[in-house]
Image (cartoon, rainbow, N blue to C red):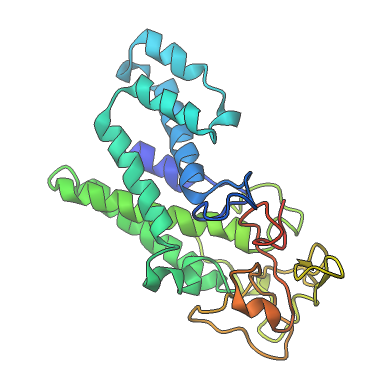
């Protein structure tokens, strides 16, 4: 059961925009954060497992779980109801361990400043390698968990880190803008090929235009130039934005690199224009 659940978790992909922690909820009230998306993915996995393995719950509870609308799993009260249906404090704790480990990728210095942890700075091959490494480690830890319970806790934390990076691929890259409406199937299995990534000297973005004459916020809805994979550079990370080429920035008021050529950015972390140039 443990392996089945984790394999499901590793392949859950979401393309919704999200910010890591709702610190700017007044400007971005409809944003969905990493923790909520992760919880929704975990519940989809649990519901699928219980649907095919009903012996783990009573018939009444199985019917209640089957009636859950997956389209509204992102609502907090639905998760609360599901926790009550499962009635397992250990399960609730396990979910929170994964959620908090996910959020930590944006708060722990060595992780938040690492471009490869976020698919930033066109680090597609490095980020792909990170997914492969974490996936391999999670599977190994789960296999050993029968003799060492601490391994199971570590596996959940590593799963949270993995899921954060996986989610960032969709909100930090131009995968959606290229017209894709399905997850990239090779993520977690293979390294993205060089031929699919914009070259180091290729201009990928044009300068954004002011949203209004009086606003410091840019209009970046049509700033992408490349038809290959690209992602924005973020000020303060370990991979610096090259000067004079016209690479994209992550963008938003929290990104210092947004003021360098090409100005603006492409992130979809939230539904706020102030935080996410490709908001919505």
Residue at point 35% right, 40% down? Answer: 95
Q: In this view, does 152 lie above or below 263?
A: above
Could you say where residue 49 lies in the image, as x and y percent from the top left? 41, 28
Q: Can residue 111 be seen in this view?
A: yes
Q: In which quarter of the view is residue 51 placed?
A: top left
Q: Is residue 217 above or below residue 153?
A: below
**Horizontal relation, residue 48 to residue 134: left or right:** right
Could you say where residue 234 lies in the image, as x and y percent from the top left? 58, 75
Residue closest to the eye, 155 or 111 = 111
Residue at point 80% right, 62% down? Answer: 221
Quadrant including the N terminus: top left
Q: In which quarter of the view is residue 241 placed?
A: bottom right
Q: In this view, does 209 lie above or below 82?
A: below
Residue at point 32% right, 53% down? Answer: 157
Could you say where residue 279 lies in the image, as x and y percent from the top left? 71, 55
Extreme left residue here?
147
Q: Can residue 187 be seen in this view?
A: no
Extreme right residue here?
213
Extreme bottom residue here?
244
Could you say where residue 81 lies in the image, as x and y percent from the top left? 43, 23
**Horizontal relation, residue 180 to residue 42: left or right:** right
């Amino acid at each position: 059961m443990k392996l089945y659940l984790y394999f499901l978790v590793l392949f859950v992909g979401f393309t919704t925009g999200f910010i890591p922690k709702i610190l700017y909820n007044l400007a971005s009230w409809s944003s969905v954060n990493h923790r909520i998306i992760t919880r929704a993915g975990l519940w989809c996995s649990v519901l699928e497992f219980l649907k095919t393995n009903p012996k783990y719950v009573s018939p009444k509870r199985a019917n209640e779980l089957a009636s859950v609308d997956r389209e509204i799993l992102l609502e907090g009260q639905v998760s609360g109801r599901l926790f009550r249906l499962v009635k397992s404090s250990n399960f609730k704790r396990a979910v929170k361990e994964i959620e908090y480990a996910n959020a930590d990728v944006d708060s722990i210095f060595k992780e938040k400043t690492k471009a490869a942890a976020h698919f930033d700075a066109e680090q597609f091959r490095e980020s792909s390698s990170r997914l492969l490494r974490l996936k391999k480690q999670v599977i190994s830890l789960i296999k050993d968990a029968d003799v060492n319970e601490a391994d199971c806790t570590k596996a959940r934390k590593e799963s949270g880190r993995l899921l954060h990076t996986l989610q960032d691929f969709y909100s930090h890259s131009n995968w959606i803008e290229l017209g894709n409406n399905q997850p990239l199937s090779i993520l977690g299995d293979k390294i993205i090929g060089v031929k699919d990534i914009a070259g180091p000297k290729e201009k990928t973005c044009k300068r954004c235009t002011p949203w209004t004459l009086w606003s410091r916020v840019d209009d970046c809805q049509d700033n992408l130039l490349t038809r290959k994979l690209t992602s924005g550079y973020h000020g303060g990370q370990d991979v610096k934005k090259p000067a004079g080429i016209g690479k994209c920035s992550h963008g938003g008021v929290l990104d210092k690199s947004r003021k360098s050529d090409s100005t603006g950015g492409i992130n979809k972390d939230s539904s706020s224009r102030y935080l996410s140039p490709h908001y919505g």
